[in-house]
Image (cartoon, rainbow, N blue to C red):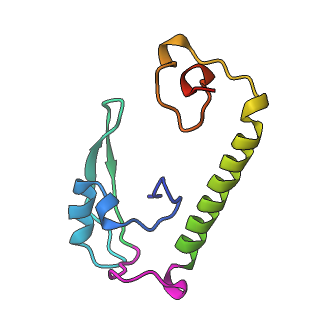
Amino acid sequence: MIEPNSNSARWPIRDLDQQVFFVLDKLKPGEVSEPQVVVQPDGTKAYRLLKLLSRTDPHRANLKDDYRLLMQAAEGRMRSELIDKWINEHIASTFVRIDPVHRACPFKYPWNKENSGQ
């Protein structure tokens, strides 16, 4: 399973589905679970097997053990800062049509100049 926010196979315990947590909590590294029934978003049923590759004890992040995670966090922050900078530089010269239904919504950037006082 890939953790969707970090695109990593490492999951913080707090982010695991409760059913998955209880299955993995009983496994030792390298063990495979019994088949688990899973209800898909469309309502169909499927089966899955879970294999615990490794277990990392809780610890303070460090470069030796968490380099990839720290690198992804730094890249995400840099990407966000670059996007913010680009938007702030181009927002005045960019036309954005906002559907009337959504004009009263709060936006992170002042796309709706009618409601932002600009």
Quarter of the image for the C terminus: give it: top right
Q: Quadrant of residue 58?
A: bottom left
The picture places residue 52, in percent across and down from the top left corner, at: 36, 71
The picture places residue 68, in percent across and down from the top left corner, at: 57, 74
The picture places residue 53, in percent across and down from the top left corner, at: 41, 74
Farthest residue, direction front: 117
Q: Give the answer, above or below, for where 103 lies relative to 6.
A: above
- Give the tally of numbered discs: 0
Q: Nearer the viewer, residue 61 or 44?
A: 61
Q: Nearer the viewer, residue 108 or 22?
A: 108
Residue found at x 65% / y 55%: 81
Residue found at x 47% / y 30%: 106
Does the magenta portion include 60?
A: yes
Farthest residue, direction top: 100
Magenta part of the chain = 53-66
The picture places residue 51, in percent across and down from the top left corner, at: 36, 67
The dominant secondary structure in magenta is: loop
Does the magenta portion include 14?
A: no
Residue found at x 65% / y 18%: 97
Q: Give the answer, above or below, for where 61 lies relative to 107.
A: below
Quarter of the image for the N terminus: give it: bottom left
Q: Is residue 87 left or right of residue 21?
A: right
Q: Is residue 45 left or right of residue 69?
A: left
Q: Nearer the viewer, residue 25 or 30?
A: 25
